[in-house]
Each structure stands twice: as C-alpha cells, then as structure tokens.
Amino acid sequence: MDNLKVVIIGAGMGGLATGIALRQAGYEVEIYDKVSELRPAGAGISLWSNGVKVLNRLGLGKEIASIGGKMERIAYYSNTGEKLTDFSLSPLVEQVGQRPYPVSRTDLQQMLLDAFGTENVQLNSKCVAVEQDANSVTAIFEDGHKATGDVLIGADGTHSTVRRYLLGYASERRYVGYVNWNGLVPISDDLAPKDSWVIYVGEHKRASMMPVGGDRFYFFFDVPLPKGTVSEPEQRREELAGFFKGWAEPVQTLIQRLDPLKTNRVEIHDIEPLEKLAQGRVALLGDAGHSTAPDLGQGGCQAMEDALVLANCLLTTNLSVEDALKRYEAARKERTAQVILGARKRSDMTHGKDPEKTQQWYSALKDEDGSDIIAAISKTILAGPLH
Ligand SMILES: Cc1cc2nc3c(=O)[nH]c(=O)nc-3n(C[C@H](O)[C@H](O)[C@H](O)COP(=O)(O)OP(=O)(O)OC[C@H]3O[C@@H](n4cnc5c(N)ncnc54)[C@H](O)[C@@H]3O)c2cc1C
C-alpha cells in the first residue's frame, strides 16, 4: 500500500525503529511521546544478533557497531569466585551471521533519534484515547489535541494506553519474582575482562557485567524478593552489599564503584501473551504488545523485529490496512509469546523457583563448554524473521 499516514504513540526503541522503517517504506510518519525530554529508563541492553540484523536492514549497521561493546566471550563464576565456564562467542556469530552488541540505552536512543530526526518527534503528547472508523484512526492527547492517520501504532511501552483501547480491558502486569539493579561503571580489569560478559551466580541471585561502547560495563544484579520492597537511591550500595555479602572480590569492587544515585532498581514484570496485537487500523508493538522478563535479553530485539515485519506487511500487501495489520499480528503473535514464556521459564530456573532445578543448573554450568548455551541463544535468534 502506498500513501499512508502513520501515527506512532511512543518514542522508545520500538517506536523509533518503526518510524525509521516506515519512513523508508515511503510513508508519512508522526511520533508522539508523553515525556518532555526523552530519557530512556535503564542503563544498558544486550542487542542480540536478531535486533542488530534489523538495524543493519534499516541502514544503521555502522552506527550500532560504533556504540556497541565488543563482547567476545561469556564467563560464568560461582558467587565465591570459582570459574564455572568461559567460552568464545565466535561459534554463535558464525551460526547466525552477525555479532550481538551490548549498548548503553542512551546511546541507542540517540542513534535512533538521529536517524529518525528529533524534530519529527512531538513531546508532551500523552495519548489518553484512540478512536477509529472505516476511513481513519485518531489519537487523542491529554491536552485535547488530536492526530489522525490511516494507521496507529501503540509503541507506548509496558503500561500502554493503546493496549487498553485495543483489548477493551487493562491487562495486569505479572511480577516475575525478582528485583533488578542496573547501571554503568568504567571498564576495568579488576572487575572483569573487557571483552567478556561475566555472570556470577549463587544463592538464586546474579551479579553481572557486560562491555558497552565508551569503555564502560553495563552491570546488573538480580535478587528474588517479595513484591513491593523499596529502598531509597542513597541506600543502593548498602542494600547490594547486604544481599551480596561474601561474594567474590570483583562483585565487592563493583558494589563499591557504582554510583548509587545512578543505579536503577526495578521490580521485573511481564504480561501474559495477548490474544490479539491488532484491531482495525491499530496495532501494538514492542512492550505494549508483549512485555517480557529480560532473562533472554529479547524485549528490545522483539520490538526491532516487530518494526521490520510491520513495515513489510504494509508495504508488500494491498488489500487494506486492516488486512495488513492482521498479517502483522499473525507473524508476531506466536514468536513473541514464545519469548515471554521462554524468558519466564529461564527466570524461574535461575532465580530458585524450584531450588533443586537451580542447583542442577549451577552444577551443569561446570560441565558447559559453551555449546549448549550457544545453541539456545542461536535458536532464539534464528526463530526471528531475519534468519
Ligand atoms: C532490567 C531490564 C533489562 C532489559 N534488558 C534487555 C536486553 O538486554 N535486551 C533486550 O532486547 N531487551 C531488554 N529489556 C527490554 C527492553 O528494555 C524493552 O523491551 C524495550 O525498552 C521496549 O521498547 P518499547 O519502545 O516497546 O517501549 P519503551 O522503551 O518503554 O518506550 C515506550 C515509550 O512510550 C512513551 N509512552 C508511554 N505511554 C505513553 C502515552 N500514553 N502517550 C505517549 N507516549 C507514551 C514512553 O514515554 C516511552 O518513551 C530489558 C528490560 C529491563 C526492564
């Protein structure tokens, strides 16, 4: 179909990647976001090869490579510092045809904004309602202004307003069962090798560092906790020091080196796979359509895949907008549901839902030469649209 005007709600990585893809398809695109300044939540993200391939396809290959960390290896250690396994990621790159890039979220957001054009994103525009008829669809914003187009994409994240409109009810987010702390620290040999993603595991918790561009490690900590625990940012260091007491030296050094005020603390949620991702002229994309726990590192990558598939469905079919969006839904529903359920399963295994299974996983890591882990990552990547 040609000559479409597309209204996108949300200028996160999903909305921006979609804006770029649809603009390249020749469509008129307007993106609206509720914030007054775009500042991504969270510090870093591992963009696995399926996400990177979409960026390559959008002509952003050089840009993502320039902000990405050079992650060559994965190493697991026990909480006390015993090396469990350490292997090269080269076989993965050979299998899937593209290396992954861990990146800082701010760099990724800026890269996408530069490609789309900051001037084309309307801020201070909180979408509160959506209306559609046979000929058009309209977003209504809190201050009363409206944006009308042929297609409306809800890329408005895990608390999506467009999702509520599309489903007709508010889908509950589900607490996965653990709290995640994350941030950035300068790269340093006394923390981890600068080419490795290092993960310390024990007591159903994790402490991890991976290299992102700009000579920094993106770090995260996970601790299973009941829902609703809180702490002030000033207490982050003491809180982590308590949870990771007795863990290996690099973990202690990391806790001392992080900036407590710039360390995020998030209760991890997902949503049940939705029965639909499209309704008439409206479609959901990214976390709005399929919020997942980060245990496969796939939420953002799935938003990138959505962007490409959506652009292809609109561009390559010509029955109607409604029909193209149903094709998008058909192409994405099962794939994204599998990621949600797979991440949930992995989260349960690593965070001690059944302590015996977590213990078995710790033991299996000692016998791991990398091939099982690489096979699992590769399978997830190759199940995407660009295999
Ligand atoms: C701890 C953690 C680690 C993660 N690690 C990874 C990883 O390693 N790899 C990976 O691929 N993914 C990872 N993810 C998932 C990833 O962060 C998300 O999947 C991704 O940010 C989704 O992008 P999005 O554009 O759909 O939503 P968002 O990035 O949430 O963007 C939504 C945008 O919509 C705007 N908005 C919201 N409501 C409205 C409204 N009513 N009107 C207008 N604008 C609105 C918001 O301001 C925001 O800018 C992780 C997530 C977490 C929590």
Image: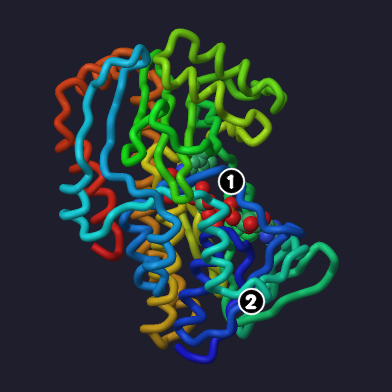
Mark closer to the observer (1, 2): 2
Residue extending furthest toward the right: 143
Residue behind mark 1: 171
Q: Position of residue 330 (x, y in %)?
A: 37, 64
Residue 358 visible to the viewer? yes
Disc 1 residue lies near ligand 1 with CB under 8 A: no
Number of the label disc, if any, that sits on residue 87: none
Quadrant including the C terminus = bottom left
Residues 32 and 69: in front is 69
Q: Is residue 269 left or right of residue 326?
A: right
Q: Is residue 142 left or right of residue 23?
A: right
Kindly identify the amino acid type of the residue bearing the numbered disc 1: Ser
For label 2, the crowd category at 10 Å Cα-Cα, with few meaning under 14, some 14 to 19 and many 20 or more, is some
Q: Residue at x 37, y 23 (%)?
A: 200
Q: Residue at x 36, y 21 (%)?
A: 201
Q: Is residue 127 above or below residue 324?
A: above
Q: Is residue 131 left or right of residue 321?
A: right
Kindly identify the amino acid type of the residue bearing the numbered disc 2: Glu
Residue 273 visible to the viewer? no
Q: Residue at x 50, y 45 (%)?
A: 44
Q: Is residue 331 above or below residue 360?
A: below
| Mark 1: secondary structure | loop
Q: Position of residue 185 (x, y in %)?
A: 52, 36
Question: Earlier along the polypeptide chain: callout 1 or callout 2?
Answer: 2
Residue extending furthest toward the bottom: 3
Q: Position of residue 48 (x, y in %)?
A: 34, 51
Residues 32 and 176: in front is 32
Residue behind mark 2: 30
Q: Is residue 120 left or right of residue 242?
A: right
